[in-house]
Amino acid sequence: MSPRPSIREEIQFRAKVTFGLVFLIGSLVAAQIFVVQTVQKKKWLNKVEKMQRKPMKIRATRGNIYAADGRSLLATSVPRYRVGIDVTRAKQKYLDEKLDSLTNLLANFFQDRSANEYRELILNARKGGKLQFVALGNHLVDYQERQIIKKFPFFREGPMKGGGKFEQLNRRVMPFDDMALRSIGKLDRDTQTRGDFGIEFSFNNYLAGRDGIGFFQRLAGGVWKPLEDSPEVRPEAGLDVVTTIDVNFQDIAESALRNQVVSSNAKYGSAIVMEIATGEVKAMTNLSRRSDSTHTFYLEDFNYAVRGGTDPGSTFKLATMVALLEKANLNLNDDAGFCGGSIMHNKTEMTCSESHGNQTVRQVFEHSCNIGIYHLVKNNFGFSNADNFVAYLNRFKLDQPVGFQLKGETEPIIKGRKSSTFSNTTIPWMSIGYETRLTPLQMLTFYNAIANNGHWVQPFIVKEIKEADKVIEKFEANKDPNPICSERTARLAQEMMKGVVERGTAMNINTGFCKVAGKTGTSRKYENGYVKNQYYTAFIGFFPADNPKYSCAVIIDEPQGVNLYARDVAAPVFRTIADKIFAYDVALHPAKNRPSNIQKIESQEQTGYAEDFRTVSEELGLQNAPNTAGWVKATKNGRSVTWRKVDAYDKDLPNLAGMTLRDAMHILENKGFRVRYSGLGKVSDFAIVQPKVVALVLK
């Protein structure tokens, strides 16, 4: 039996085993490191590179939105730049020399950090020793600001030498600020890639384009930069949208509406201008009253023209009158009954603005008489059966949306006998504009059809989709081949609307440069009962009245103050819009026959030198120029001009009538006269006032 080892020997043995194991493991680790750094180096570098690179979406450039002229930009994408610097690029000597200059410039430009804070930010990033992209500034810069920053140290040397970089991002802008904002629309706040409302939303599939794919490299700080030599799928730019909006009409409508809603402190206002024959919406503006802690202001944050359905009030009486004219073949001077100011219907009182007495059909409409409408509807349609009256309203397309290109149009409500809220008061009150729901655009489309002699035209706001100068798709208004009423009825309705302005509720706007026609509408606001002194006011019509080209609707809701009715609130806005568009649109003014060149010369009745007249005749292409010498005068001979010789030198005082001052002075001074004159123009009278002194009167 061998002796048991001592404790010392046992400890030494264990130490040797432990050391051997550590040595073996260390050798294996060293060997593996050697393999990784040599044999497997390329493999692991590729893996690291792949982790730092990945394919990313390249945003397509969004298409532009243009006004009707195809040139004025309503919305476009412009480049904005994120400013940053790769702090590892610049050499230490350059950094020491230029860093203070850079940080002072950055502090003055962005004013978000002090120069010392910028210095510390850059130096701390540089100490990290790795590739670092440090974002600078508190906002994206535009192109002009980018050009300024490019002159800063580190930026003027370029991204590889100095490290200064700009990351381009596209942002949507509206060159005309918020003009027609709810019609043009905006992009969603989160991604800035999808239309949120308006044309941007409704035509997003055209405008958005198709994004591409490219490889990006990740830099320290979470910043990704594109790799220029990487394979990629190129993005396809979005198509351009050309609208029907005329920027001048839009400015006219918005300015007129804003002045009125501000002065009346109205809840909101809306105005639409539409070209009658084509259905093109030339202007659409919507203004809502909003307040903050300091003041009240108006902005476009809801499209009342398309989505603001409500009781249209007395503007609906045009539909009622057109139905009556069609049903009963009425004449405008037919008796319409007596208005005593109010009438009871099934224990419910219907009131009128005043007691109008006996009235004709024309006067009922011009005075907007509720009682007169009541009698006419009762006598010609009756109240027990709604189907006949409602059938006419459906024929006028008031029961269906107009199918406007902007999504979100409110469905109209025209009640029939099967409606859940239909009652024995529905037809009387519907006939004067209550118990219905229609938007301003839906009402305007009906008025537009009447101005168009009964031919219904669908309104539209986008007319073309373009790729550069190439038209990809063209839109036109849908036109119903069947008129909604006879031409006779449309003509009579037009006459009644002219009468509203000439003799009726809108006499206060029977002024201005352009003759207009239309209908006022003032409806009481209903909130669990009619609210006192809260009205929805409207004026809808067309201009010029005798040869209509444009229809227009003006809506102002809940005006405040003394004058709360449509004649005083909405109608003046219509008048302003009509006058300014009439002055702007030269096509509305008939061409005048210009006088012929012969008439121009004859009308002057001027005496002058024959050689001068020959020069004028040659310039104007006249065939019968004077063929004599000396002084002549033009006189009319039928359709031509005859030149009569004037011997100005035979008398002491020659015949100076019709001469210019220059010619008269030439003759008189050659004969030894001194000349005095008064007035401007040609010689109309002359006389010797002193020896050898002649006085001339010019006119």
Image: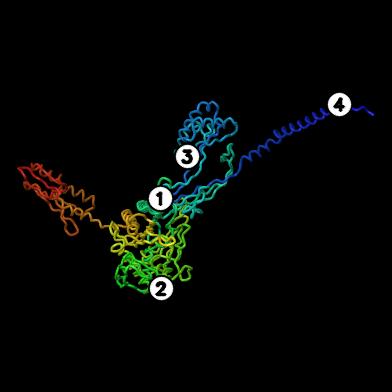
Near-viewer residue (621 or 419): 419
Q: Amino acid at mark 1?
A: Tyr
Task: Label 3: state its secondary structure.
Answer: strand
Q: Earlier in the sequence, mark 4 or mark 1?
A: 4
Q: Residue at the spot x=79%, y=28% of the render?
A: 19
Q: Nearer the viewer, mark 3 or mark 4?
A: 4
- Alpha carbons under labels 2 and 4: distance apart: 123 Å
Q: Whole-Å distance between the Cαs marked 2 and 3? A: 68 Å
Q: Secondary structure at mark 4?
A: helix
* Residue that numbered label 1 is attached to: 298
Whichever of callouts 3 and 1 sits on the residue coming sooner in the sequence is 3
Give the residue pinned by disc 3: 141
Q: Position of residue 148 (x, y in %)?
A: 45, 35
Q: Quadrant of the N terminus?
A: top right
Instruction: Please identify the quarter of the rendering in which residue 516 is found.
Output: bottom left
Residue 688 percent location from the top left of the image? 6, 46
> 10 Å neighbourhood of mark 2: few (<14), some, or many (≥20)?
some
Amino acid type, callout 2: Phe
Q: Which residue is drawn at the image coordinates 46% and 59% (left, top)?
A: 409
Residue underneath mark 2? 383
Q: Nearer the viewer, residue 215 or 441?
A: 441
**Mark 2 or mark 4, earlier in chain:** 4
Q: With 211 as the anchor, is 641 left or right in this view?
A: left
| Cα distance in 3D space between marks 3 and 4 | 79 Å
Q: Which is in the foreground here, disc 3 or disc 1?
A: 1
Q: Residues within 10 Å of mark 4 (few under 14, many from 20)?
A: few
Q: Position of residue 562 (x, y in %)?
A: 33, 56
Residue receiving disc 4: 7
Cα distance in 3D space between marks 3 and 1: 29 Å
Callout 3, which amino acid? Val
Q: Is residue 274 visible?
A: no
Residue 618 lies, with reference to residue 51, above or below; the image says below
